[in-house]
Image: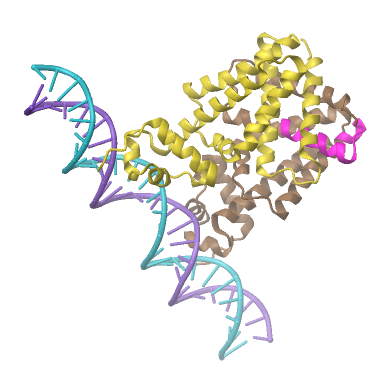
Chain colours: A yellow, B brown, C purple, D cyan
Amino acid sequence: MPRVGLTPEQVVDHALTLIDEQGPDALTLAAVAARAGVATPSLYKHVRGGLTELRRLIAVRVTEELAARLADAAVGRSGDAAVAAVLRAYHAYATEHPHRYNALPQAPQPDDDLNQAAARLVGVIVAVLREYGLDGSEAIHAARTVRSLAHGFASLRIAGAFQLAEDLTTTHDRLIATLTSGLHTWPKP
Amino acid sequence: MPRVGLTPEQVVDHALTLIDEQGPDALTLAAVAARAGVATPSLYKHVRGGLTELRRLIAVRVTEELAARLADAAVGRSGDAAVAAVLRAYHAYATEHPHRYNALPQAPQPDDDLNQAAARLVGVIVAVLREYGLDGSEAIHAARTVRSLAHGFASLRIAGAFQLAEDLTTTHDRLIATLTSGLHTWPKP
DNA sequence: GCCATAAAGCTAAGGCTAATAGCCTTAGCC
DNA sequence: GGCTAAGGCTATTAGCCTTAGCTTTATGGC
């Protein structure tokens, strides 16, 4: 039995390509093991908690990827342009990797790792909101609003919930305009 | 073997209470069958497509329930108050039945039944938007925006994505204000 | 250079699931 | 009274996760 030299990161890599190709429901330890060239139980040597732990690791990885994309999009921009760029980057990621994005809610309850990755993502949004004069608690409320809009649109779009003929790019443009407009008139308490 | 007299609707009923109590992952034909007092394969007599079909029926039912709640909330109100009421009703439903709401994305690709239920839901939103001078394609874009915001917030909240201490009711208030403000300044093309 | 030990692989087995096939009984209609 | 169809059942297959326990490999200390 030649040693494959597997790492948890590589297991997640295999899992992600599997998800990209066949969707989150195709994520089975058997399939991941086959891809890694290893028997199914051997995976437990690297991913102790089995399938649940693997899903957790996937969620962390995807959240990190997404946060990085948002950060890239925000750099060098400000104000409405920055918000627009972040939202477009969010949507671009979800569109490029729909299955991967859909795998996100399959994670177990959030833990420290996931919260940390999510914090990075929120950090990007909060930074962009600073130019609207939003900070402290109000920035958190605003960031939650931004996240809700971004996630909701991506999620519904991937699920095929937008069935009518209207152009989705136009919807996204309007949605961004609505958001920036709302941010400008943010109800300062 | 006394005949139980099961109907597809009753099967969905059992499935929904099961989901409410133990979450969408606990939805197995075995568990539903036990609850219905019947052997697992017997369910196929009522729900031909097995688990996939059952999930489809659940999605339709939940979407119908949600649409009805939104319609109830909208009646007798207009303008910003109507939008606010619809969003609050949406969130209230998701909060009351988090597992049920979470079961929604488990549905297979949308079909006619589900589209029809979704159309009712969208119809309520479009009706409310009419008072903002929005109709035709622009109303569709706006309705998609409203849906994205409502779904995104509910979905992230249920998933436990909002970890910080800030009050979620305040977030929801701000979110609604942002939306109505954005709808007033909707970019007429 | 050798040996002990821990890591990383394996097989086997248990228990769960969906789904299909085929049989039996009941209910209702002609 | 008898036929048909619907609604039950058991048995079976195939696939999955997970644990237990064994074997091999690689590595670090002497």
Residue B81 is covered by the magenta coloring? no
- Which residues are the magenta region? B129-149
Residue A71, picture quadrant: top right
Please say if A84 is above or below A139: below
Q: Can residue B92 be seen in this view?
A: no
- What residue lies at 51% left-to-right and 34% top-to-bottom? A107
Relative to D28, say whether B134 is above or below.
Answer: below
Q: Which residue is drawn at 49% across and 62% down?
A: B41
Residue B179 in the figure: left or right of residue B46: right
Q: Is B139 contained in the magenta span?
A: yes
What x and y, as percent, mark residue B53? 60, 56
Main SS category, magenta section: helix
* Residue at left offset 70%, top offset 26%: A87
B114 left or right, relative to C15: right
Total residue callouts: 0
In this rendering, the answer to whether A137 lies above or below A86 is: above
Closer to the camera in the image, A81 or C29:
A81
Q: Quadrant of the C terminus of chain B?
A: top right
**Residue C17 pos. (x, y %):** 45, 52
- Say which quarter of the image contains residue B113: bottom right
Q: Foreground residue, D19 or A84?
A: A84
Report the side of A76 relative to B85 (left or right): left
Give the left or right position of residue A24, taking residue B110 as reference.
left
> Residue at 56% of width from left, 18% of height from top?
A119
Q: Where is residue A147 in the image (x, y as percent from the top left)?
A: 66, 25
Residue B64 seen by the camera: yes
